[in-house]
Amino acid sequence: MGHSFGAQAGYAYLARENNVIDAFVSLDNSFDYKTMEEIESPFYRSTSWGEVNEALTNGYENCRATVLNISGTLDDGSIPDYELVKRLFKTDIYLGTFSFPMLHESFLSEAALAYPLVYRHYRDSAEVAALHRDANAYEVLAGAVTAFFDHSLKGEELERTQGNGEMNITYQPPLSFPSKDSILHLYSTYGLDTIKTLYQQFQKISPRARMNLSPVLARMTENKETNSKIAFLRFLLDFHPKDWRLLKQVSDGYLDLNAKKEARIYYELALDYCDDFEVRSEIKEKLRLVEGR
């Protein structure tokens, strides 16, 4: 279990190979309340936020723990989106949210212990009420954490509402990608726009949450839909601009259309990122072809 920076360190550890954690509780890590755009901004990229973002994005498969992530609501009373935590998309995640904003220190025993000593020194009744509320909420928090560990390690039931509604717990199961047959059915029945929308939804969770679209691309090749296939591949490249496999397929499509200028551009990009020796040789040969050498 970790609080604040300790929660961030815990998440980074969960993403390491051979970690030995079976259940993990995060208490009020600061990035719960931020969007991915903020977390990935230059200001935060070089901080611990950036390190945790990289760890959860690239090391999600290393997490075998069940996770309980607890925060308060935002100042306007809305529930955080927990965007970074959800990048552990192969993990059982429970998201516990208090029904009110919580003071950061109140996720420790500090609020409960300090309240009897300090409340007399506050003249603002709203501040006193918030301190009293947080002090009482600590018992709910401790009960939720205990119940979660009993659930994760002993198989006991986990109540989704704690403390007469003070905390609600939602469950996010591991993300399941559609099968090849399902993708083809969606494509055949609803068209390419549905596949694009589905892909965007997975990408919103994590850039590593990639569906296998080879059945759709193969079907487009069979149907000789070269222009549509190129447009779809370029849509995918917006998300993965350094994917040499996608770049090469775009190049091959342009070559089929005898659009040598465009083919050359994408072959050169594919060559920049390709790490397969045999494919690099093939790309170089095709470059010589389009350049007329």
Image: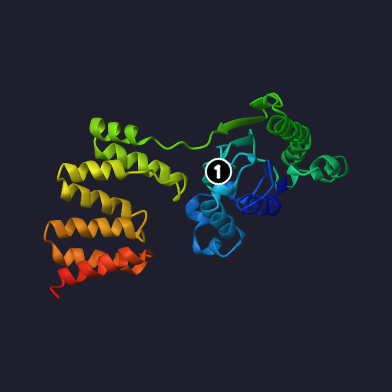
Relative to residue 36, is residue 124 depicted above or below?
above
Does residue 226 appear to the left or right of 6 in the view shown? left
Relative to residue 162, is residue 30 depicted above or below?
below
In-front residue for pair 233/119:
233
Judged from this view, the residue extending furthest toward the right is 117
Image position, residue 136 (x, y; %): 78, 33
Image position, residue 17 (x, y; %): 61, 53
Residue 71 visible in the current orientation: no
User: Where is the N terminus found, in terms of image quarters?
Assistant: top right
User: Where is the C terminus found, in terms of image quarters?
Assistant: bottom left
In-front residue for pair 280/195:
280
Who's the residue at 54% across and 62% down the image? 45
Res 26 quadrant in image: top right
Who's the residue at 36% across and 58% down the image? 243
Who's the residue at 35% across and 67% down the image? 277
In-front residue for pair 59/276:
276
Judged from this view, the residue extending furthest toward the bottom is 293
**Mark 1 Cα shell of 10 Å, populated few (<14), some (14-19), many (≥20):** some
Image position, residue 98 (x, y; %): 65, 35
Question: Amino acid type of disc 1?
Answer: Tyr
Does residue 187 appear to the left or right of 89 in the view shown? left
Res 148 quadrant in image: top right
**What residue does disc 1 label?**
82
Residue 228 visible in the current orientation: yes
Res 16 quadrant in image: bottom right
